[in-house]
Amino acid sequence: MSEKFLADTGARIPLICGAMYPCSNNELVASVVENGAVGIVQPLSTIFAHRQDLRESLRMIQQRSRGGAVGFNALVEKSSKLYEQRMRNWVDIALEEGVRFFITALGNPRWVVEKVHAVGGVVYHDVTERKWAQKAVDEGVDGLICVNGRAGGHAGDKPMEQLYGELADFGLPLVAAGGVGTPADYVEALQIGYEAVQFGTRFIASEQCSAHDDYKNAIVEADEDDIVLTKRISGVPVSVIRTEFVDRVGTEAGPIARWMLQHPRLKHWVRTWYAARSLFTLARGNRRSGGYDDYWQAGRSVSGINSVESVETIIEQYAAAWSERDLSQNDLAADDEADQAAE
């Protein structure tokens, strides 16, 4: 059941449009929230990719959503003091504008938990395995985004069902992230026991996403065998669609970068350099692929995505599948009660 997730987020449907750099544009987030799901504001996308003011963007989305489920993504990796201070300021702005649902990732979420809990908000944390989940739970998070091996972007390496089995005993709401591209996949994730599902790739291939049509068409045309992992975007494996460009440049970081990524102090610097390089690409105005030259991030859910559709149509499909599942579960429960009464 999804009651705790819905209470935590204020959503009407147990579904999240995840934070996507650079694809989380205001129109996409606002449309998701308007249609009853959770839309996550990604501050790096808002400020650097789309060159919009964060506070004004939050106000616009809040106004359009009329109190809907607006969330905020806080990447808490300690790459530099300047970055950490900026993220703290962005979180403060989100709180001042009434956001009460936060998703943290890539570091210790404690300071976000403290700020958000102080005003009655909720924090979920991205995890790919139990050891990271345990650390996040110890810091007081309220739920877990369970990133499996079929996710786009920074994917995990475990199957959806296995990851649920490893994390269920924490007793927190678990959200499946990765590999869900059809209503049937969505229902399957809920039947495993997840309270909600986070989507990324499906919403890139939407009318409201500002990604280039070439990117959207690549998702529609791709199959799951076309998804490969590359370390050349951020220094850690990222799921992308295989293209001629990816084949030409390869998928491994260079020897110096690989050495730096293994170093406990230098790894943060090299990841910062990768991030700065992608921002520079955006600053040059290369929007064809969404900012990474010909890197098109996507998960294995591409196998179930056959067309570019409106956010409203996408969410309607998944809301209908969720409602049908709940009705069938209620029917089963009623049958069980009748059988017990007869006995």
Image (cartoon, helix red, strand yellow):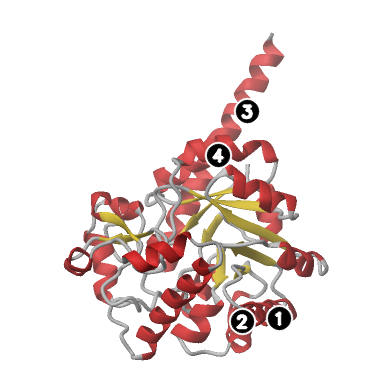
- Whether residues under marks 2 and 3 lie with C-beta atoms below 8 angstroms apart, the answer is no
Q: CA distance from mark 1 to mark 4?
A: 34 Å
Q: Are marks 4 and 2 in contact (CB under 8 Å)?
A: no
Mark 1 falls on what kind of element?
loop
Q: From the image, tell me which residue sits under label 4.
A: 164
Residue 173 seen in this snapshot: no
Spot occupied by residue 221 in the image (x, y as percentages of width and height)? 21, 60
Residue picked out by circle 2: 58
Which residue appears at 38% of the width and 67% of the height? 257
Q: Which one is in front, 306 or 329?
A: 306
Q: CA distance from mark 1 to mark 3?
A: 42 Å
Q: What's the residue type where badge 2 is placed?
A: Leu
Task: Say which of 86 and 176 sits in front.
Answer: 86
Q: Which of the marked residues, 2 or 3, is nearer the chain's N terminus?
A: 2
Determine whether 334 is above or below 84 in the image. above
Q: Amino acid at mark 4?
A: Tyr
Mark 3: amino acid:
Ala
